Image (cartoon, grey):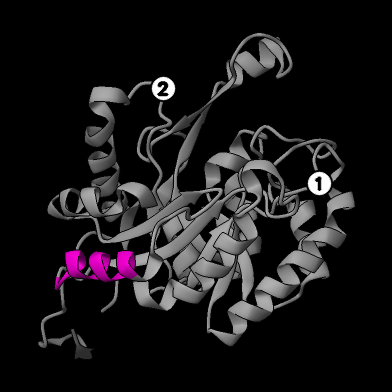
Amino acid sequence: MKQLPIGALIKGVYAEEVIPYYLQHGFESFGITYWQTTGTIDLAEQAKRVRELLGDSGATISSLTVFGNPLTGTGDNADTVASWERAIDHAHLFGTDLVSGFTGRLTDEPIPTSLAKFGEVFGELARRAEDRGVRLAFENCDMHGTWEKGDWNIAHNPAAWEMMFNTLPNDNIGLQWEPCHQMVSLIDPIPQLRKWAGKIFHVHGKDATIAWDVVREHGIHGPHPFVWHRTPGFGDTNWSDVVTILMQNGYEGSIDIEGRHDPVFRDELEMSAQVSALHYLKRCRGGDYVPNPRIQYGNGML
């Protein structure tokens, strides 16, 4: 029986260095990320080395991700669209059919203003991806943007998702979702997940803690922090509910832990927290698979 894999996000520039370390701790999948550009990395060669490192471990590459603003194409984002294209073209060499990242947005314009450019850029990328059997997913991080202004991503609010998927109703376009990015906007992730599970292609393992006492006393626009990104197992989300809803909706992806955000379990405690999250999420998926014995049990076989 195939279980929902639990893995980690790793940076492309360090992928070959860290994969062996993660494997020895039992991580089962890896989302490889690149910031704004794949740069000088030879993706074909990297794919070969990564597959060799995975060997017969059973671990897989869940996604290739390019975090940047593909709608502007200027400055440090000049290579972002080309990097999406390279990731789409090389995904199969890594053994994945998923490429993800931010949608981008027109700088400091309201979200609806970016939809035409979104349709133009990702219409082409979606066709390229479809020709290669690849799906595209958009991460739901606001990157400190709002509905009115921002510089990275429009895919951080369900109202924007409606607009995006109306603009591009392609079956190979979906979401790369995590509860944290909705909780920072005080959105309850569970009813949202029930509604959008069919459009979720990949899940990031990152949680949040909301200090409701601070919200009630000070609101959200004052100097007092009211929400923190957390490693799964240390935040407010019941990940057993997340896994249940995903499985009820036929989800076939992984949950890849996104570390380096927790305000407490960080620095020297970083990997302790990530390994703790790994074991926690494995329990939330039902533990390790144990086959049923073939014995008579009641009126049937167990």
Q: Please provide percent x and percent y for residue 289.
A: 20, 69
User: Looking at this view, is 292 or 222 the one in front?
Assistant: 222
Q: Report the quarter where the N terminus lies.
A: bottom left
Q: Quadrant of residue 121?
A: bottom right
Main SS, magenta region, reads: helix
Q: Is residue 55 magenta?
A: yes
Q: Secondary structure at mark 2?
A: loop
Q: Is residue 54 magenta?
A: yes
Q: Report the quarter where the C terminus lies.
A: bottom left
Q: Please provide percent x and percent y for residue 78.
A: 65, 51
Report the residue marked by disc 2.
263
Q: Please provide percent x and percent y for residue 20.
A: 16, 54
* Amino acid bearing label 2: Pro
Is any part of residue 97 visible from this angle?
Answer: no
Q: Nearer the viewer, mark 2 or mark 1?
A: 1
Is any part of residue 9 visible from this angle?
Answer: yes
Residue stretch rendered in magenta on the structure = 45-56
Q: Residues within 10 Å of mark 2 (few under 14, many from 20)?
A: few
Give the left or right position of residue 192, taking residue 61 as reference: right
Q: Please provide percent x and percent y for residue 187.
A: 66, 40
Q: Secondary structure at mark 1?
A: loop
Report the residue marked by disc 1.
106
